[in-house]
Amino acid sequence: MPDYQTLTLDLGARSYPIFIGEDLLSAAEHTLRPWLGNGKVVLVSNTTVAPLYLARWQACLEHWGIAHHHVILPDGEQYKDVQHLDQIYSALLAAHCDRKTTLLALGGGVIGDMTGFAAACYMRGIAFIQIPTTLLAQVDSSVGGKTGINHPLGKNMIGAFYQPRAVLAEISSLCTLPARELAAGLAEVIKYGLIDDVPFFDWLEQHMPALLARDGAALAEAVAWSCRNKARIVAADETESGVRALLNLGHTFGHAIEAGLGYGQWLHGEAVAAGMVMAATASHLAGWLSAPELQRIRRLIEAAGLPAEAPPLGAERYLQLMQVDKKNEGGRIRFVMLRGIGQAFLTDALPTAALNAVLR
Ligand SMILES: NC(=O)c1ccc[n+]([C@@H]2O[C@H](COP(=O)([O-])OP(=O)(O)OC[C@H]3O[C@@H](n4cnc5c(N)ncnc54)[C@H](O)[C@@H]3O)[C@@H](O)[C@H]2O)c1
Ligand SMILES: O=C(O)C(=O)C[C@@H](O)[C@H](O)[C@H](O)COP(=O)(O)O
Ligand SMILES: [Zn+2]
């Protein structure tokens, strides 16, 4: 029996495995080798993750006799931009990479989103594999094929839907993650419970101390549960014409916080956490969500060490930033709201009074 789990994101010919285990390198013959093809490999990482984890994957490629190169980007959301994306293309061209090249994204969501977008565009599309090293990337960004970069005027505004060949989520890499980053990942984990999974929300209420203590079994369970939920939603709606928009719970407000404060000031997960409390509060004020459920949501977010209060950008600024959102249609802002825990829905009819109250 392998000591890792395998989930599948079912997208027909573009289906792929999501491997989840403590140590996937020792099983790399099964978890990595089959997805590499017969071209070169280029590892993309950053200045924080590369010193920790790059050498072990390079040694594995050496062992197989696979030619490889690497690109190391600066660390931070503020570098998820077109200038730093261009550094990946320059490295690929300098190394004479052809269409058989496979990119390996080794890092958090920033590296994964940028590497995926580089793979989507280089020579009109080459293969890439996600090796997510943050909790957030393991439970969310490495799965589902949203790739891209930020623009000064809006978060993730330039990008492509482009699926990886495989996802390798090594739970052991979470040992070196700063506590603030672990908490940021928990925001997206809580999101899945709120969208449509009451048993998961209940489980998270019971297991939050174990998750914060980095209990390996609890983390593996949270990653697998989250990936199952995300894979189910993405398989039903890959390019977000319907149900996938629910994965944006908390993000209409959250993206405004990230862009409004300047990318990198608040972590993505922190902004999503505060954004989910704003969405829950607005849902309550609109008469959709009960007061006890709002309290439960706030308590779980606070128990994860996440901010429940949004920064005071001012209602005008929030509205201006939220006008730049990919969910909007016909100039109307569409929000993900809650009728209850596990009952998210999309609406463009949030009462103005409820919206103004949370923006204030
Ligand atoms: N594509 C999607 O579906 C999707 C989903 C959610 C979030 N995102 C994007 O993902 C990004 C956020 O991802 P993130 O939270 O992983 O941030 P991140 O990529 O910036 O990583 C967080 C920090 O942890 C460091 N780090 C990574 N792995 C580490 C490890 N094992 N040990 C020590 N340090 C480590 C990084 O260098 C960085 O400083 C945002 O840009 C967000 O928009 C995308
Ligand atoms: O996969 C999705 O779909 C998501 O919405 C997941 C989000 O957690 C993630 O932050 C995503 O990048 C947001 O997408 P965007 O289209 O609103 O930029
Ligand atoms: Zn997110």
Image (spheres, rainbow, N blue to C red):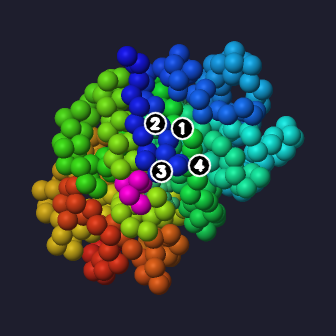
Spatial CA distance of label 3 from label 4 is: 22 Å
Spatial CA distance of label 3 from label 2 is: 15 Å
Q: Position of residue 356 (x, y in %)?
A: 33, 76
Residue in view at x 27 percent, y 75 percent: 354
Residue in view at x 58 percent, y 53 percent: 162
Observer-nearest of 105 and 351: 105
Q: Position of residue 48 (x, y in %)?
A: 63, 31
Earlier in the chain: of badge 2 and badge 4, it is 2
- Circles 3 and 4 in contact, beta carbons < 8 Å: no
For the record, the magenta segment spans 233-237
Which residue lies under the disc numbered 4?
113
Q: Quadrant of the N terminus?
A: top left
Residue 22 shows in the view = yes
Left or right for 212, reference 160: left
The answer to whether the beta carbon of the residue marked 4 is less than 8 Å from any atom of ligand 1 is yes
Q: Quadrant of the C terminus?
A: bottom left
Which residue lies under the disc numbered 1?
166
Residue in view at x 59 percent, y 49 percent: 113
Earlier in the chain: of badge 3 and badge 4, it is 3
The label nearer to you, 1 versus 4, is 1
For residue 18, the mark is 2
